[in-house]
Image (spheres, rainbow, N blue to C red):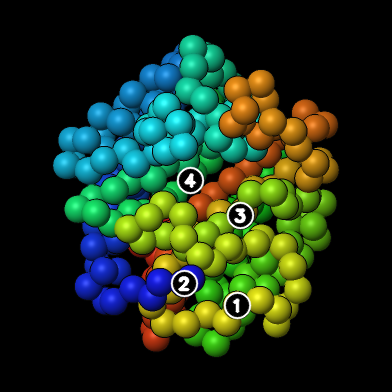
Amino acid sequence: MIILKTKNEIEKMNIAGDVISGMHEALRDFIKPGITTMEVNDFCETFIRNQGAIPAQIGYEGFPYAICASVNEEICHGFPSDYVLKDNDLLKVDTVVEKDGYMADSCWSYGVGNCNDDVLKLMKITRKAMYLGIEQAVIGNRLGDIGSTIQEYAESNGYSVVREFTGHGIGTNMHEDPMVLHYGKKGRGQRLEEGMVITIEPMINQGKHHLHLADNGWTAVTDDGKYSCQYEHTLAITKEGPRILTKQKGQ
């Protein structure tokens, strides 16, 4: 069941979103060669708690960390660890914040140190794919309009779209209806209504879209070992168009 949000509820979710956007803005200077992904996790958890918010991922279905820290061929749900970041690593930082009972969700990708043109292009195309999908998130469109737009753009640039992980509704729960695919056909799927709040979070691979789970049972990894990139915003469907609730300064 899709739970439509009131304007007041959307404002509360925007407050949670501001915590995440502030965290990602702070990470721009924090992430660099020589630090571990566990240090990134600890930085994020401290930032979130200092804002009077809760890192909602901790304990969700047993997940033990404040963030997902996925590096290079890790697509999503990567575990923070003692892995030391180096030049040309691609780190995806994904987290959910709860503030006064309402949640927001956002992932951002960070090129570590000096990155080659292949990594920079993957980041650029994935980020634009997300924003092109967001442009389709207007009253009267269908979910397929979002997915097909992302898929067409990614594939036209020689990349592939992960199928197994999707966007979703969000509110007082981390995952709500509807499921938001990042591939599909225009004019298909649930029609978008005012008050829907969803995430759009394409995971785009340099190679094929096929994946497997790591031994920890959580982390998805590309089968061919090529890099994967992800960007994600939480947004509300409004009469004025899509309202990004996790918007960062300068982005």
Residue 226 occupies quadrant: top right
Residue 107's mark?
4
Distance between the alpha carbons at the discs numbered 4 and 1: 24 Å
Question: Mark 2 Cα within 10 Å, few/some/many (few <14, many 20+)?
Answer: few
Distance between the alpha carbons at the discs numbered 1 and 2: 10 Å
Amino acid identity at mark 4: Cys
Depth check: 211 or 36 in front?
211
Label tally: 4
Q: Earlier in the sequence, mark 4 or mark 1?
A: 4
Distance between the alpha carbons at the discs numbered 1 and 3: 15 Å
Q: Earlier in the sequence, mark 3 or mark 4?
A: 4
Q: Earlier in the sequence, mark 4 or mark 2?
A: 2
In this rendering, the label closer to the viewer, 4 or 2: 2
Q: Is residue 247 visible?
A: no
Secondary structure under badge 1?
loop
Mark 3 lies on residue: 166
